[in-house]
Image (cartoon, rainbow, N blue to C red):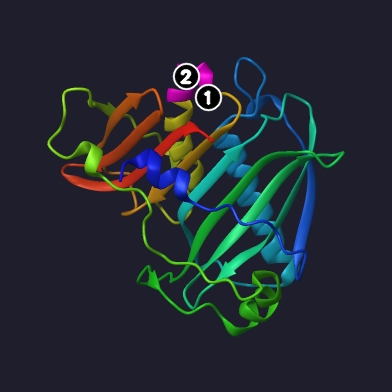
Amino acid sequence: MSFAEAARAFEMVAPTGKGRALTRRRRVRLGDVSPGGRLRLDAALRYLQDVANDDARDAGWDDPGWVVRRSVVDVVKFPQYLQEVDLTTWCGALSPHWAERRTRISSIDGETLIDTAALWVHVDLASMRPSRVPDEVVADLVEAANGRSVSGKLILKTDRFDGYPLDVVTQQWTLRYSDFDFLKHMNNAAYWEILEDHLKYRRDLRNGLRAVVEHIVQVEHQHHLIQQYDDRNDGVSIRLLVEDVVHAQAWIGML
């Protein structure tokens, strides 16, 4: 199965309308947009982080031990500069060590602009190994999840890159101090700047796109990051490596 087939097979489950949900409104600002005035993917991922943090604080979860394993983003229409948008977040699925956080970015009149599903893994911050989701968090999320569970397995496959075919481009991706957060790892949103770098050349993907980023091994500040990508009609497949180890993989293409 190719990256494109695996990415398109992911099911963006509709909300049940049950249980806990939180909505926050914000305006798309100058630092969030491309030169053409559309919301950038990396800025959209920061929005998702912010509303997830707002939800945790609103619920009273004093628990920073969550890391993103996978993000799937469906763009129906890009929000534009100075547009007001609503971000609504809820739990789409729940398992003992992780949860799927669904977040929808809508216009203020209710039109869905961007739909997302992020797999968040609960970890012990000392060891960075998965740990059980606390009971008080489960109690708040279980109704919205409505009995749906989610697997922690990666969905993208690396077969397209095996054997280094001639159409795969390999290049260095320069890391910056601002790419890292207080966990001393490359922040989730920073990975999406790499997808933005491809999107500027693929105007055919500007609306009606799906993008997937999966995190395998955290990227740290001393790493030298290598990008391999394969740009084809159905989309762009991407791997990020440190030496010979795949640290992240991604795909961006038509929805």
The number of callouts visible is 2
Does the segment drawn in magenta span residue 204? yes
Q: Is residue 106 left or right of residue 133?
A: right
Q: Which residue is rendered at x = 67% and y = 19% of the image? A: 37
User: Could you give the CA–CA distance between mark 1 and mark 2, rounded to whole angstroms?
Assistant: 6 Å
Q: Quadrant of residue 111?
A: top right
Magenta residues, start to end = 198-205
Three-letter amino acid code at the position of disc 1? Leu
Q: Position of residue 97 (x, y in %)?
A: 47, 74
Q: Residue 16 or 143: which is nearer the viewer?
A: 16
- Circles 1, 2 touching at the beta carbon (< 8 Å): yes
Up the image or down, 15 lies above or below 112; here it is below
Report which residue position mark 2 lands on.
202
Under circle 1, the secondary element is helix
Q: Amino acid at mark 2?
A: Arg
| Res 39 visible | yes
